[in-house]
Amino acid sequence: MLAYLRACDTHPTAEEIYTHVLEEIPSLSRATVYNTLHLFAEAGLVRVLDTVDGDTRYDAELSTHGHFRCDRCGALYDFNIDLDHAATPALQGFEIRERHATYKGLCPDCLAQQEKE
């Protein structure tokens, strides 16, 4: 399951992971997938992404990066961003435990498709 996540660039949901891994392990249960993903997250092996649409997705890319979510097709894309040096003077006195950057809009494919319509 971890190998699949590391090779996957689509930020899959638990259900998508289950469907893929089920092909290799027919006796696999959904509960095992959810429990394993929870353990992976606790161990710091994957990052849990709570998306705007309510789906929980998983990302094995642990380096600091941002995400772009296409409003039309729902795809998530990684992009490089320097969150460690982002100015946050309004948060003086706060303890920041996590930093996330999520951008939303249209991916190039959906933008091109929209322009054709």
Image (cartoon, rainbow, N blue to C red):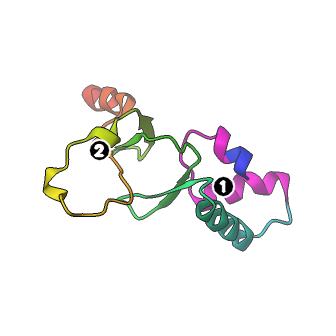
Q: Residue at x 44, y 41 (%)?
A: 64
Q: Which span of residues is magenta-colored?
A: 5-25
- Which of the 4 quarters of the picture holds residue 116? top left
> Which residue is the site of mark 2?
104
Q: Nearer the viewer, residue 24 or 8?
A: 8
Residue 37 counted in the magenta span:
no
Q: Which residue has dot 1 on it? A: 17
Q: Give the vertical position of 86 relative to 88 (above or below).
A: above
Residue in the picture at 20% in, 63% down: 93
Residue placed at 33% from the left, 46% from the top?
101
Judge whether 85 appears above or below 88 on screen: above
Q: Residues within 10 Å of mark 1 (few under 14, many from 20)?
A: many
In the foreground, 56 or 115 = 56
**Residue 113: percent from the left, percent from the top?**
34, 30
Element class at badge 1: helix
Sooner in the amino-acid sequence: mark 2 or mark 1: 1
Question: Percent position (x, y) of residue 112?
Answer: 32, 26
Q: What residue type is disc 1 on?
A: Ile
